[in-house]
Amino acid sequence: MIIKSFEINKINIKKNPYILLYGKNEGLKKETTQTLLKNKNNISNYEEKEVLDNYDFFLENLLSKSLFEQEKIIIIKRATDKILKIINEIIDKNVEGLIFIIYSDNLEKKSKLRSFFEKNKKCICIAFYPDNDQTLIKLAFNFVKQKEIFISQSNLNLIVSRCNGDRETLLNELNKVELLSKSRKKITQEDVEKLTNLIENHSITDLIDNCLAKNTKQILKILNENNFNNDDSIIILKSFLSKCKKIFILSDEFERNKDINLTILNAKPPIFWKNKEITKKQILLWSPEKIKEIIFKIHDLEYILKKNMNNSINIITDFILEQSNSKTSN
């Protein structure tokens, strides 16, 4: 059954527990999944290749359910027509309490997977097309209105224009704006230009990139050349967190395929050509386990910074230097 992306409230997930989300709009797919699975736990994530290579293990996990589990949620990412036979088998088993969500890239009309989900009464098929500027501006406006953030429409448009049509990037930038608004009555153009850090001001990005690439000399040079202050500390921390999450996904992908060039090629959103070499170095240096450790540390550090704003830039600087000199394994 075909459902539009704005009609998800019509979905009865108990009646239609098999859902295909396909298309290029990764940000909206994630939002939709969060809405569908609100207040639900016990979610297992798989790549299609994992399922195809280890079907018996996958099926065992799918069918096994503890005494206290009422639902089991399975998400399969990067699915293609190759997985259709397995999906047919699973639907035929009629597993009670199973919610089955599949992520795919663009699927043409001739796709067997798409056709199956469109026609099967137990299934839901939703296409996610790229957002246009008008949609993203509306999204940004609703965000700042809901959060009661004072920012002009022109500065809001500036944020949207810097996100290259990517919803997920926009939401990341708006979350930075929300955080900064707690210490600002109004967000100015200067704040936006420094905060979004996507075009003119590359110093924070360079700082974080060189930290994760373990270029300590370059880190010291950047710190000496830029007069970072306490107001910058939260921005640096949030940017660091965003970058670590991206490297975690790439490092995890690399552990599976063992091909660094393929990992870079398949990255979503695509990696800008100037950043490919340093990103390769970061992936090779940081295993998923090690980068996850930093992510946990960043969450803890945010609390410390907010309690020590008068000394926050020194705290975040020490943290960056500590990570650049830490031991990693991959």
Image (tube, rainbow, N blue to C red):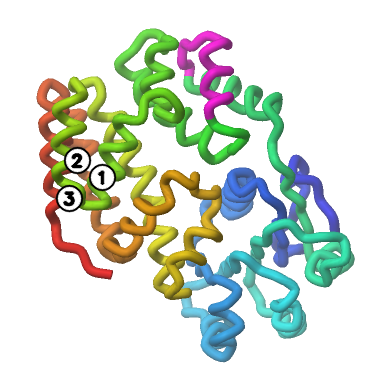
Query: CA–CA distance between discs 2 and 1?
Result: 7 Å
Q: Between marks 1 and 3, how big is the CA–CA gap?
A: 11 Å
Amino acid type, mark 1 = Asn
The residue located at (12%, 53%) in the rendering is: 325
The magenta-colored residue range is: 148-162
Query: Depth-wise, is mark 1 or mark 3 nearer the camera?
Result: 1
Against 81, residue 28 (above or below) is above
* Magenta span includes 314: no
Q: Point out the tag, 2 or 3, that comes first from the N-terminus.
A: 2
Query: 155 left or right of 88?
Result: left
Q: Position of residue 171 (x, y in %)?
A: 51, 34
Q: Which residue is mark 1?
A: 210
Judged from the image, the secondary structure of the residue bearing numbered disc 2 is helix
Disc 2: which residue: 218
Q: Which residue is mark 3?
A: 323
Asked if one can make out residue 71 in the rendered structure from this viewpoint, the answer is no
Closer to the chain start, of discs 1 and 3, is 1
Quarter holding residue 247: bottom left
Q: Main secondary structure of the magenta part?
A: helix
Q: Quadrant of residue 62?
A: bottom right
- Which sits in the foreground, 181 or 91? 181
Q: Is residue 103 left or right of residue 328?
A: right
- Between 277 and 107, the residue placed more toward the observer is 277
